[in-house]
Image (spheres, rainbow, N blue to C red):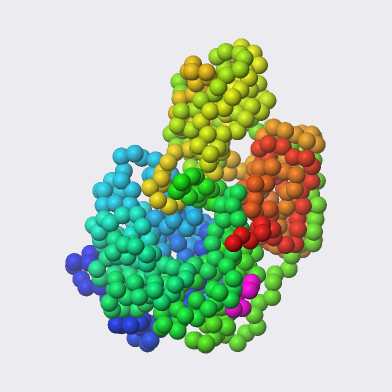
Amino acid sequence: MPTEAPHPTEAPNPTPALTTTPDGFLLHGTPFRILSGALHYFRVHPDQWTDRLRKARLMGLNTVETYIPWNLHQPEPGTLDLQGLLDLPRFLRLAAAEGLHVLLRPGPFICAEWDGGGLPHWLTTDPDIRLRSSDPRFTDIIDRYLDLLLPPLLPYTAAAGGPVIAVQVENEYGAYGDDTDYLKHLEHAFRERGIEELLFTCDQTAGDHLKHGTLPGVLATGTFGSRVDESLERLREAQPEGPLMCSEFWIGWFDHWGGPHHGRDAENAAADLDRLLSAGASVNIYMFHGGTNFGYTNGANHHHAYVPTITSYDYDAPLTESGDPGPKYHAFREVIARHAPVPQEPIPAPSPKLPPTTVELTTYTPLLPLAGTPVHAKDPVTADEMSQRAGYTLYRTTAPTPGPGLLHFAGGVGDRAQVFLDGAPAGVLERERYDETLPVHVPRADAVLEVLVENMGRVNYGPRIGVPKGLLGPVTLSGKPVQGWDCHALPLETTPDPASFTRSEPTCAEPAFHHGTFEVKTPADTFLSLPGWTKGQAWINGFHLGRYWNRGPQRTLYVPAPVLRPGANDLVLLELHGTTTPQAHLTDAPDLGPKGP
């Protein structure tokens, strides 16, 4: 059991390994420039962590950075999950073994285009708590979380001989609020629980973000992707002395469903990196390796409209989603070599890929009959009221009157609803379009009305964090209340046993699980392509690859080699609408869509 750390007022903090001078860093008393790249352990298969870390070092980086997603590490209050994809201590050991330092960004809010910005759903849906503030109801919960999180991490701080040389306080807080007491509470919380290393904040350099998000005595860093000289000047104005550091140097961007696939020219990004390093600044490249929003982990933005993030988090990064060096990898390595030594080892070659393979999906089982014990309610209850973080919710009742009418969903849907009458599709409503009303024709008295609602990802940035999912209010049909609902939570983290599936219909047009098998001789990376399929989720050997949607821009899902096994492999698709083909394809190249402007 770790011993309790001394209270900051009882004894002075030891000198951290990483310290600051008026214009730079010292590491153990020696001048040091941070050359870091973002690599989120929770977006990479654990069996590939070593490979990605080695490629970071070979590009010339001396440090990697990672967020910590509170919502996955603490799915329920009082718990802490450090297993598998969430084994952060193992990731830190592997980074140290590769000779890399680590910048740790525990939040508690991380943004990261991640579900809910990393804040747990059980917290954000409490209307009485003021998020990201000094509200004691919020800070008390953070304290209890840190009581669990930090003790297993302390052995990996530089003070204990580990790789962690700095820890971030919150994340781009100046874009959200100006509660300095909240930031002070976090600083105190880290210190009193044994974090001796350098603390830093990070904020966008535009507007008043640096003014609102910084904290006296804590290093301020900036986030930007261009206008390097101007951004560094603003950072220096906000902090007259100390190292200049870009803690998120944006070298690509993320994508939304229905939008373009973003990219940035490698030569352009490399030129800005050179400007940054020529100014003597330290850097964290965001992202060095983006990885994947496996399962239901993608976030969403909601400025003028709700727009969910795609499954891939490739980010047009130096290391692609499948871990291959791309154009930026080579360009950045050349830039770094002008300013610091780079390893003289050969640049890694792309990983082997599985030969193109066709998968026949031969059996299926409908989704809606699988719903378990419901919550009975007069009006629909939200997914959050059923304590569900992600996945789907099914609402079932009977329509009060036959004939044509208008279904109205007060408050809309969160986030995409498919409506069925006696099992027949009646229409779709989407939060993106602010849909609340659907014209329908009820075929008979007491027809079964079902509404399947998909959570497309929780908002990760701005004031709409915590907006609920599912049906968001009462329902009427042509002005008359529709009541007496059976509300089913369908988290669908795993799939039903394919042994229970029956022979598939070639063009099944109802929400259903589809199953097929394929043979693999030697496991290797591959990409799942689903032409003819519409929208749903994919699993291989029980590993949840994430969401697919023919809306694009993403057309393939990355399948990490460790997910596969020699011999027979299982593919399960949850298709929500229908397919024109019983086949899926494994290809040797990704298709994330044509790059937009």
Q: Is residue 473 left or right of residue 186?
A: right
Q: Nearer the viewer, residue 206 or 140?
A: 206
- Image quadrant containing the N terminus: bottom left
Q: Is residue 29 left or right of residue 75?
A: left
The x and y percentages for residue 13 are 25, 73
Q: Nearer the viewer, residue 561 or 587?
A: 587
Q: Which residue does the image show at 34% across and 72% down from the upper left?
A: 234
- Image quadrant containing the C terminus: bottom right
Residue 227, image quadrant:
bottom left
Q: Nearer the viewer, residue 283 or 436?
A: 436
Residue 343, image quadrant:
bottom right
The x and y percentages for residue 361 are 78, 43
The residue most toward the left is 10
Q: Main secondary structure of the magenta part?
A: helix
Q: Which residue does the image show at 36% across and 70% down from the upper left?
A: 221
The x and y percentages for residue 596 are 61, 60
Q: Is residue 271 visible?
A: yes
The x and y percentages for residue 324 are 65, 70
Q: Check if residue 31 falls in the magenta segment.
A: no
Is 597 drawn above or below residue 305 in the view shown?
below
Is 85 drawn above or below residue 378 in the view shown?
below
Q: Which residue does the image show at 65% across and 83% down from the upper left?
A: 346
Q: Which residue does the image show at 47% across and 69% down from the upper left?
A: 225
Q: Is residue 373 visible?
A: no
Q: Check if residue 327 falls in the magenta segment.
A: yes
Point out the stretch of residues depicted in magenta.
325-331
Q: Is residue 514 left or right of residue 275?
A: right
The residue most toward the front is 597
User: How many numbered circles does the render carry?
Assistant: 0
